Every structure is written in C-alpha cells, then in structure tokens.
Image (spheres, rainbow, N blue to C red):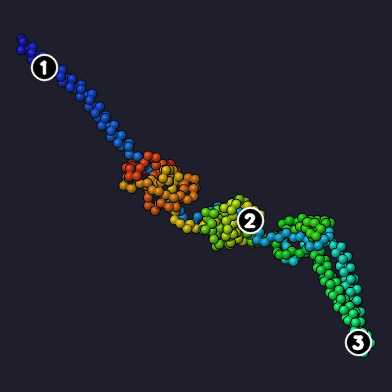
Amino acid sequence: MEPRSKKRGWLIAVLALVVVVVLVLSGILPRVKARGTLKRETDEMAVPTVVLVQPQQTPGAEELVLPANVQPYIYAPIYARTNGYLKKWYVDIGARVKKGQLLAEIETPEVDQQLQQARANLATAEANYNLAQITATRYQDLLKSDSVSKQETDNAVGALAANKAIVEADRANVAQLQATQSFQKIYAPFDGLITNRNTDIGALINSGSGGPSTELFEIAQPSKLRVYVNVPQVYSQSTRPGLSADLVMSEFPGRRFPGKLVRTADAIDPGTRTLLVEISVDNPTNTLLSGSYAEVHLKVPNKVSSFTVPSNTLLFRSEGLRLVSVADNKAKLLPITIGRDFGATVEVIAGLTGSESVVINPPDSIVDGEAVRIVQANTGQQQAAGGK
C-alpha cells in the first residue's frame, strides 16, 4: 500500500507542476506578444506619414487683372475768347459735330463799339498821314530852291514818319478787335461728341479778362480711347509697349474689347509704387463710353522660371523658409525663396527645379534624412493642394 501511495503522490505533484507551468505560460506569452506588437507599432508610428504634391510651373505669360479709367483719345473744354452775352447755341449734349461746325454765337456790343471807334481813329490817322505826306513832299521840293529852311523840311518829314507810325498802330488795333469780334462765333476744333453744355441764351460770357473764364462746351473724340492703368512695381520690368490687353466691363458680360499697350510713364509713382501705362482701344462704333470704369486683362510675360506650391507645404524654420521633398522615402529640406502670395498657393522663384515631390503639411519635427512613409492623397487633399 505504501508504494502505491508514493506513486500517487508523485503523479499529483507532476500534474500540479504542469498546471502551474501552463498557467504561467498562458499569462506570460500574451504579454510578451503584446509587448512585441506594441514595439512594432511604435516603430511604425515613429515614421511620419506624408502626402506629396508636385510643384506647378507658372505659365510663360501671366494675365493681370487691374482697374482702369477709360478716357477719350482727344478731349477739350471750349471757352469763350470774347466778352458778351450768349446769343444762340446750336448743339446740345450728345450731338456729333464736325471740325469747324458752328456751335454758338455771342453778342459783343462793347467789342463792336470799340471796333467802330478804332476804325474811326484809323481813318483820322490815315487822313493825317496823307496830309503829312503831301506837306513833306512840298517842303522837299521848295528846299531845292531855298524857299524853305532845312529845319522846316525836317519837321515836315518827321511829322510824316510819326503819322505813319500812328496809322500802323491804329491798323493793328483794328485787326486785334476784328479778331476779337471773330470770336463771337464758336466753332468745333475737331470731329467729336459734345459731352457737356454749360451755358444758355442770355448768359454772361467772360473771356477771363475780368474774372474766371466761362466754359461753354466740352467736346470729346470717342472713336479711339485711352485707358490708363496703374501696374504694380513688381511687374514694371515686364510691362512694355506692344503687349496685348483686353478691356472688360460689367455692362458687357462675356465680352472682351481688344487693346494694345502703347506707352508707359517709365517712372514709378512714389505714392502708389505703381507704373502708369496707357492702353489704346479702338471704338469705331462708340460702343464704349468714355469716363467708364473697366478691368484690364494685361498679359505680362514672366522673365524668370518659377513654380507655385500650396501654402500648406511651407515649413517655417529659424534659418528661413523650407520645403520638404522626398526621394527614396527620405526627407530632404530645401531652402527656397518665395515671390508672390496668391493665398492658397505661393510662388517659388528660387530653390526648385520642378522635378521634386514636396510634402503637404510637413511635421515641425521633421529633419533632413528622416525616413517617411508616403500615402496617396485623397481627392479633397488634391483639390486643396491645387488651390481649387
């Protein structure tokens, strides 16, 4: 009986040991496995996951959209050159006139009276001159026979010269008053359109001698338009005569009116830091109204090759702006120089060749040479990267 009892005791001990070992192993192995899984996941998470985008090269010519003022090619306010009262006007606003066409007449009673008096003075001077001429001739003949003295002859000749000068002065005065009287009639200086009439019948007309001049009409020639645009300084070196430009107005949706840049101020306005340019636009049917506000679409060539990248690809570091490119799953920090800021995108004028793939939203902790994991951007990210 005793050997059986010992054998049974050993069997129970072995079974108990097996149970203990199984219990220990069932508790340790999952922990070891979980630790290994945790380490593996930690290592994987330590590698940044990045989304890439390609820099877009800017086109060879860029279209600038700038506000503009539309003005007639020729414009002139018409003033009176004589004093008086408006007798009659023949054209009103909106009238199309030809060069030399009569626009208005002015009554000038004072000028008429002055001219009449000047003519009377001229007639008196001419009579005195004729008498002095006869006297001088007679004295010169009598001097030959010593019938008169040399002094008396010299006096007669001198009186003749003085009367001649008086006649010339009176003739000049008459001619001046005749010219002033001719200003009674106002004529169109060129073919054009009457855009304003500032007088009416009976209105007092002042030529400026006794007060401010009276503007009678305003005339413009709208068959050709001058469009003035202020171009930002950054584009001034590329803005040269000969560039094409289109005029767009809100009252003509979907239409563009072609024009050409004809001249620039060749100087930057220190107040606005802009370059004033003039664009010529043909307007043969007078469709466009002078004085209008318009937008000019100016095609400016790019002198340097540049690229645009999304704004969220920029990495701000103490040493300057950087872009993160990826090659062989390794990050590389690229120093760049930016140009214009378009909001969703920025222009890079130095630091890129165009073959790079840059990271969207790069982590601040990323360093040069760090391993990264590339994932495909979804549609929303691609649209955001493209600024659409």
Residue drawn at x 90%, y 82% is 151
Q: Position of residue 153 (x, y in %)?
A: 90, 83
**Where is residue 2, by image quadrant?**
top left
Q: Which amino acid type corresponds to the residue marked 2 in the rendered image?
A: Val
Judge the density around disc 2: few (<14), some (14-19), many (≥20) Cα neighbours within 10 Å.
Answer: many
Judge the density around disc 3: few (<14), some (14-19), many (≥20) Cα neighbours within 10 Å.
Answer: some
Callout 2: SS: strand
The residue tagged 3 is: 143
The residue tagged 2 is: 70
Alpha carbon separation for disc pair 1 and 2: 111 Å
The residue tagged 1 is: 11
Vertical position of residue 357 compared to residue 25: above or below: below
Q: Which amino acid type corresponds to the residue marked 1 in the rendered image?
A: Leu
Judge the density around disc 1: few (<14), some (14-19), many (≥20) Cα neighbours within 10 Å.
Answer: few
Which sits earlier in the primary sequence, circle 3 or circle 2? 2
Callout 1: SS: helix
Q: Position of residue 312 (x, y in %)?
A: 44, 43
**Where is residue 146, by image quadrant?**
bottom right
Q: Which amino acid type corresponds to the residue marked 3 in the rendered image?
A: Leu
The label shown at residue 137 is: none
Query: Is disc 3 in contact with disc 2, using a CB cutoff of under 8 Å?
Result: no
Q: Residue furthest top?
A: 1
- Residue 138 visible in the displayed image: no
